[in-house]
Image: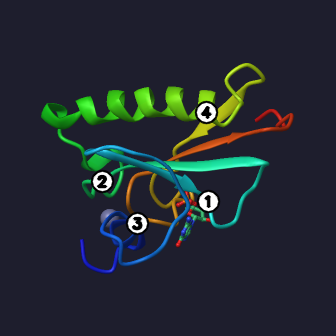
Amino acid sequence: MENCIFCKIVNGELPSSKVYEDDKVLAFKDINPQAPVHILVIPKKHYDSIIDIDDSEMDIVAHVHVVINKVAREMGVAQTGFRIINNCGEDGCQEVKHIHYHILGGKKLRSL
Ligand code: 5GP
Ligand code: ZN
């Protein structure tokens, strides 16, 4: 997807601090962390948001959660707890239009 910063991170045009990668999913540190642990987990394939994913391709979402499980353990927040956030669309304040899941942890977060 042209001009998508996360697609550019996937294809190596932009640098990132990667913490996990496989053929379908990439996890990297957020450039502006909001907690001691702030990781973004994305499918390598571009989808604007969950609304853009066809039912037939929804297994990627399960795979993203498998990766979230691994990354949370590796980043040391599996036991202490963490938050998974997916901002979707305009009212959800999604800034980057390539679906991504935030993992936030490493401190006590405020309740919603
Ligand atoms: P959103 O508000 O769309 O859910 O979150 C977008 C996130 O992407 C923000 O937390 C922002 O800090 C992060 N971000 C934006 N540009 C870059 C970048 O070039 N590299 C990295 N690692 N994170 C980015
Ligand atoms: Zn993209």
According to the picture, the residue beneath numbered tag 3 turns out to be 6
* Amino acid at the residue labelled 2: Lys
> Which of label 4 and label 3 is nearer to you?
4
Tag shown at residue 74: 4
Task: Please give the residue where the numbered disc 1 appears in the rendered image.
Answer: 30
Q: Nearer the viewer, residue 102 or 31?
A: 31
**Lower position in the chain sequence, tag 2 or tag 3:** 3
Q: Which amino acid type is marked by label 1? A: Asp
Asked if labels 1 and 3 touch by Cβ distance under 8 angstroms, the answer is no
Q: CA distance from mark 4 to mark 1?
A: 16 Å
Q: Residues within 10 Å of mark 4 (few under 14, many from 20)?
A: few
Q: In 3D space, how far apart are the residues under numbered discs 3 and 1 (Cα atoms)?
A: 11 Å
Instruction: Sort mark 3 into few (<14), some (14-19) or many (20+) by Cα contacts within 10 Å.
Output: many
Alpha-carbon span between mark 4 and mark 2? 21 Å
Q: Earlier in the sequence, mark 2 or mark 1?
A: 1
- Of all residues, the one furthest to the left in this rendering is 56
The answer to whether marks 4 and 2 mark residues whose Cβ atoms lie closer than 8 Å is no
Asked if residue 82 lies left or right of residue 73, the reply is right
**What residue did someone put label 2 on?**
44
User: Of label 3 and label 1, which has the lower sequence position?
Assistant: 3
Q: CA distance from mark 2 to mark 1?
A: 16 Å
Q: Are marks 2 and 1 in contact (CB under 8 Å)?
A: no
Q: Is mark 1 within 8 Å of ligand 1?
A: yes
